[in-house]
Amino acid sequence: MRRFLSWGLFLFLSASYCSLTLGAAPADPGEVLTLTLDEAVKRALDNSISLQKNLIDLSTREYSAQRLWSEIFPTINASGGLNYGTNLFTGDGFKADDRNLSYSVSAGLELSLNAGLPAVMKNIRLAWQAQLLKYEDAQKQLEISVAKSFYGLIADMEDLSLLEEMLKLAEQQLERNRLAFGNGLIAERVYLQSQLGVETAKYNLSTARANYANRMGVFLTSLGFGQDGSADANGGVKLEGHLTVTRIEEDPDALIREYLPKRPDIIEQRQTIERLENTKKQTVLSSRAPSVGLGATWSLGPPSAGRVKDDPVDTIRGSVTVRIPIDPWIPGTAKSQSIRTAGTEVDKARLDLKDREDAAASQIRSLTATLRNSWDSLEIARLRVKIAERTYELTEQGFRSGTVESLTLEEARNDLESARYQLLRGELAYQTTALDLAAALNVDWKTFTRSDR
């Protein structure tokens, strides 16, 4: 990839253009496009403006890193000119005479060498490696972000199904209460309460649908679809997937030992230390070591006393200059202080690395602990759902037999809805935490979302 990155940039931008022009919407307006998580991730990568900009920056860094010879390439210049000289107010005054015309042609080459050039070249390569790391990390973070949004929308879809079921149960209860009220078996207050339950269920469902449509629109836009690409009766996009979580038991210390050194921020900080060390070497060598300057000049023109028609005369001159600095060796001078400052920057960068390692280790421990504790909460939430479902069944049987009031049945239905909703949100939070752990370890987002774990 590094060798042929320029081709990679061309292909990436071409694929992005095709995705934007051809994949922005389903070909048939009446056809529903089914979108899986893998397809959503691929579309997000193809349509990410940020990734495209990162790839351009990476191509620029690579171009410089592969042409380190430019740092020692000499300065080359060429010049030419025509000169004309005559009196203006004195003597015979101004007159045109080709004998007063002269010309000059010259070419020069300058090369400056100092002991700090190797450190400069190393920093150029480090800048390329850092940009490559940034690009790869941006890809992984985008994939994880898309996975989070996708699972969030899947949870919203399941929540809509739950609300639709609750509305159906409320309407069934309203119909039974309508018949009972017509026969004089229940009071008007109970009948009105069941009507209120239906309208409340409709309101909750309508609000959830609006929120889902808004979030879906934002998500599809990030994938290259239009805002009107959300699924509807006439076509659009439909997400395909399920929110299924599996237990994750990981040893945080083992994860820290294996993955902490591979984290992009840790590698970046180590590269920063190396870059600052190179900068320190460059500063020391450039300031204190002797430098050599080489120069050569060739000129062509008429003799100094001749004119343009005279025979040309060329001259070549060469020079070698050795510069030996003195003041950087004297403590307290400006250049001596700059050397000292470069050393302190390295010390500060090492402290920053220690701080990042501690923060990263703490994050990994916190996420693994959250997953461990959240699984216990999910088990409790699943048990609550089972109890709520059985309670509603018994309450509904009692209501039909006349031993349970309508309000009690409604309370049981609300408890069932609450238990299912809390379980759904708990599973989503668990999946999100698993993705956060993948991001913290800098691993593929599928690592903690496989169905075979």
Image: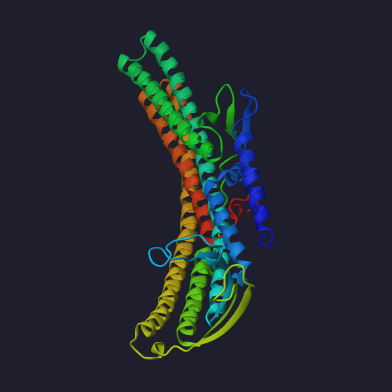
User: In the image, is 32 to the left or to the right of 369?
Assistant: right
Q: Position of residue 392 (x, y in %)?
A: 46, 31
Q: Which quadrant of the view contains residue 60?
A: bottom right
Q: Position of residue 259 (x, y in %)?
A: 56, 66
Q: Which quadrant of the view contains residue 195?
A: top left
Q: Is residue 423 above or below residue 138?
A: above
Q: Which quadrant of the view contains residue 313?
A: bottom right
User: In the image, is 311 to the left or to the right of 161?
Assistant: right
- Scheme of colours in the image: rainbow
**In terms of depth relative to the viewer, which is nearer, 31 or 24?**
24
Q: Position of residue 185 (x, y in %)?
A: 37, 13
Q: Please, which residue is most extreme toward the left here?
A: 189
**In terms of depth relative to the viewer, which is nearer, 299 or 211?**
299
Q: Please identify the quadrant where the N terminus is shown.
A: bottom right
At x 62%, y 51%, the residue is: 450
At x 39%, y 88%, the residue is: 327
At x 46%, y 87%, the residue is: 288
Q: Is residue 210 above or below residue 287?
A: above
Q: Is residue 198 above or below residue 441?
A: above
